Amino acid sequence: MINSVTLVGNLGADPEIRTTNSGTQVANLRIATTHGTKGADGTWSDATEWHSVVAFGRTAEVVGQYCRKGKQLYIEGRIQTRKWQDKEGNDRYSTEIVAQQIKMLGSKSDGGSGYQAPNAGVPF
């Protein structure tokens, strides 16, 4: 079985960084990808899809330090769906991409360095 995702998209907001009780850094990102669609009348338009991405450890630290809203990223990872309960006790589900590799794209002038976040002891 294969559970693999590859995205190239832009950050919709600055990454949200937090630290777990055990000291592990966690980064939550919202990534926008866009593709063209052709309408029935033959005109083309862009459709944007939003993705929730989570990164751990050293990768989360680097993302928090160097990535800002609008930054273009290359992300490889796997899809994960989590079950949780809201305040009323209802079951809810969240689907996200667990990043295994993140590369910053673009030139140095737009904040890109070509830097690849390293494997920091998490499944990357």
Image (cartoon, helix red, strand yellow):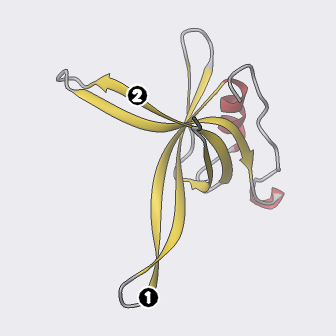
User: Considering the image in quadrants, where does the C terminus appear?
Assistant: top right
Residue 34 place in picture, x, y as percent: 53, 65
Residue 4 place in picture, x, y as percent: 60, 41
Residue with the most extreme front position: 1
Q: Earlier in the sequence, mark 1 or mark 2?
A: 1
Query: Looking at numbered disc 2 in the image, what kind of residue is underneath it?
Result: Arg
Residue 51, above or below 43: above
Query: Looking at numbered disc 1 in the image, what kind of residue is underneath it?
Result: Thr
Residue 29 place in picture, x, y as percent: 54, 41
| The image quarter in which residue 91 lies | top left
**Element class at badge 2:** strand
Q: Residues within 10 Å of mark 1 (few under 14, many from 20)?
A: few
Q: Are marks 1 and 2 in contact (CB under 8 Å)?
A: no
Residue 56 place in picture, x, y as percent: 63, 26
> Which residue matches tag 2?
82
Residue ID at (72%, 34%): 62
Residue with the most extreme top position: 22
Q: Residues within 10 Å of mark 2 (few under 14, many from 20)?
A: few
Residue 62, above or below 88: below
Please indicate whether residue 48 sits to the left or right of residue 113 in the image: left
**Closest to the observer, 90 or 29:** 90
Residue ID at (70%, 31%): 59
Residue ID at (76%, 36%): 117
Residue with the most extreme bottom position: 41
**Closest to the observer, 13 or 7:** 7
> Which residue matches tag 1?
43
| The image quarter in which residue 95 lies | top left
Counting the numbered discs, the total is 2
User: Considering the image in quadrants, where does the N terminus appear?
Assistant: top right
